[in-house]
């Protein structure tokens, strides 16, 4: 790893900690600005960012323990970088993100329960199936785990495009454009994860591209997503929807 690559990862992780920490405070304090029906969604946004802040602190700590700058060189300390923190984080936060989206729609109880349960279960299975392949750089096994993880991922995309799409049409006109944007944000940002996942198969710098790529998409998929959730909740609260 070059000094430029070391600094790139170091600064990306540092920026992420600041972004998620600030997002946590913002979402929790803004609960008072929305009606009771949407406070749970804002609470989940804050909880997601709080969990992610903790795990990024652990990732940052693990990175500093595994690598060090000395005499203009990046040296390995002998301690292993623990990438499992990301998957523990995703196992907790990815289902909560989908649940946020379902709650902000304020669907009938039965529909909320059905969509919430199916999407959260699919996302948890996706993360569990993805982890074994993350530990591999190349080979058929990595492709196999990628394909298995893509099955629940495709189901989530299908629900976001069609199932959630039908629900968006029933929402107040004032928030429909924002709901379509947040749905597009989920589809595009989440589609980036499987691309980063298979970068090592193309001979790219696996460690640097994965750490920076995942960090960048995490900020979009959690902090930016949460801000859109807040705006939608605020607008629906204003019109009593």
Image (spheres, rainbow, N blue to C red):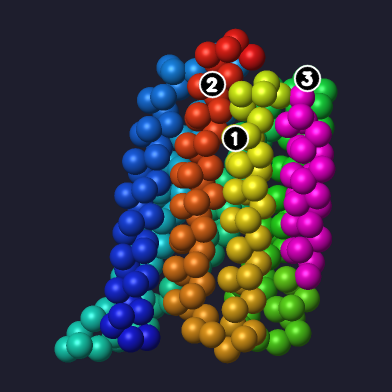
- The residue positioned 67% from the left and 73% from the top of the image is 133
Q: Is residue 138 above or below residue 125?
A: below
The quadrant in which the C terminus is found is top right
Label 2 to label 1, Cα distance in Å? 10 Å
| Part of the protein shown in magenta | 147-170
On the image, numbered disc 2 is attached to which residue? 235
Magenta segment's dominant SS is helix
Q: Is residue 208 left or right of residue 98?
A: left
When asked about the image quadrant of residue 135, the answer is: bottom right
Q: Which element is circle 2 on?
A: helix
Q: Could you tell me residue 221's position as x and y percent?
A: 54, 50
**Tag 1 or tag 2, which sits nearer the N-term?**
1
**Residue 175 seen by the camera:** yes
Q: Residues within 10 Å of mark 3 (few under 14, many from 20)?
A: few
The mark found on residue 178 in the picture is 1
- The residue positioned 80% from the left and 49% from the top of the image is 158
Q: Is residue 81 above or below residue 44?
A: below
């Amino acid at each position: 790893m070059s000094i430029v690559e070391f600094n790139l990862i170091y600064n990306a992780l540092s920026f992420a900690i600041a972004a998620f920490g600030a997002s946590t405070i913002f979402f929790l304090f803004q609960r008072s600005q929305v009606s009771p029906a949407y406070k749970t969604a804002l609470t989940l946004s804050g909880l997601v960012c709080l969990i992610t802040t903790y795990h990024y602190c652990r990732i940052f700590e693990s990175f500093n323990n595994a690598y060090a700058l000395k005499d203009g060189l990046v040296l390995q300390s002998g301690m292993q970088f623990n990438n499992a923190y990301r998957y523990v984080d995703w196992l907790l936060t990815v289902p909560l993100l989908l649940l946020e989206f379902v709650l902000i729609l304020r669907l009938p109880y039965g529909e909320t329960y059905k969509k919430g349960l199916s999407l959260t279960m699919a996302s948890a299975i996706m993360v569990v199936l993805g982890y074994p392949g993350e530990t591999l750089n190349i080979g058929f096994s990595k492709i196999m785990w990628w394909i298995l993880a893509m099955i629940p991922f495709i189901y989530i995309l299908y629900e976001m495009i069609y199932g959630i799409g039908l629900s968006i049409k029933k929402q107040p006109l004032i928030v429909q454009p924002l709901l379509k944007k947040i749905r597009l944000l989920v589809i595009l940002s989440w589609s980036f994860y499987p691309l980063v996942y298979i970068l090592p198969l193309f001979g790219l710098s696996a460690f640097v591209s994965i750490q920076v790529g995942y960090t960048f998409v995490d900020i979009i998929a959690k902090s930016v997503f949460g801000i859109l959730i807040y705006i939608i909740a605020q607008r629906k609260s204003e019109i009593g929807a």
